[in-house]
Image (tube, rainbow, N blue to C red):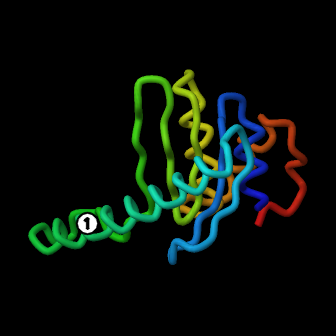
């Protein structure tokens, strides 16, 4: 759960967690009740399945559209956003810069970018940049 601790170090992150693709397990830290975290894990799992299905349908009509493989999704509300990459979720406030910081860490840890942006972000958060990040 190292990524969850790194996400929670970002000012403006409300909660972060991990869910099982099977839907039977989840873990989280932050300002959510266990029941809300359970519902969030169900929401994340069902939305991830839906996004993957929609990506398959879209790519059947538009080959090489760039939407596969699906790595995650984001829902932005009036005051907060939900970010999901892989099987990790993060609830964050819509304050300037928070979303970019969250997505940088999530994409570096479970997504598609290399280690360099994470080293930059980790240093910004006061972490030891010489520590093994993976």
Residue 124 in the image: x percent, y percent? Answer: 77, 35
Instruction: Point out the residue furthest to the left here.
Output: 61
Quadrant where the image shows the N terminus:
bottom right
Above or below, comparing residue 100 to residue 134 in the picture: above
Along the line of sight, which residue is nearer the eye, 47 or 96? 47
Left or right side of 24 for 27: right
Residue 34 in the image: x percent, y percent? Answer: 67, 51
Can you identify the residue that label 1 sits on? 55
Number of residues whose C-alpha sits closer than 10 Å to that of mark 1, classed few (under 14), some (14–19) or many (20 or more): some
Say how many tags the image has.
1
Along the line of sight, which residue is nearer the eye, 3 or 25? 25
Which residue occupies 51% across, 77% down? Answer: 22
Which residue occupies 56% across, 58% down? Answer: 113
Quadrant where the image shows the C terminus:
bottom right
Residue 68's image quarter?
Answer: bottom left
Above or below, comparing residue 99 to residue 4 in the picture: above
Residue 70 in the image: x percent, y percent? Answer: 38, 65
Instruction: Point out the residue furthest to the front here.
Output: 35
Above or below, comparing residue 117 to residue 132 in the picture: above
Q: Secondary structure at mark 1?
A: helix
Residue 13 in the image: x percent, y percent? Answer: 66, 35
Residue 2's image quarter?
Answer: bottom right
């Amino acid at each position: 759960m190292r990524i969850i601790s790194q996400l929670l170090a970002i000012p403006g992150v409300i909660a972060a967690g991990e869910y099982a693709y099977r839907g039977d397990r989840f873990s989280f830290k932050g300002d959510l009740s266990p029941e809300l975290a359970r519902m969030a894990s169900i929401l994340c799992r069902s939305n991830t399945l839906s996004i993957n299905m929609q990506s398959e349908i879209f790519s059947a009509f538009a080959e090489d559209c760039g939407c596969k493989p699906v790595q995650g999704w984001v829902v932005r509300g009036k005051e907060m956003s939900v970010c999901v990459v892989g099987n990790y979720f993060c609830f964050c406030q819509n304050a300037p810069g928070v979303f970019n910081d969250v997505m940088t860490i999530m994409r570096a840890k479970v997504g598609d970018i290399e280690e360099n942006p994470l080293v930059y972000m980790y240093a910004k958060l006061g972490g030891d940049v010489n520590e093994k990040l993976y």
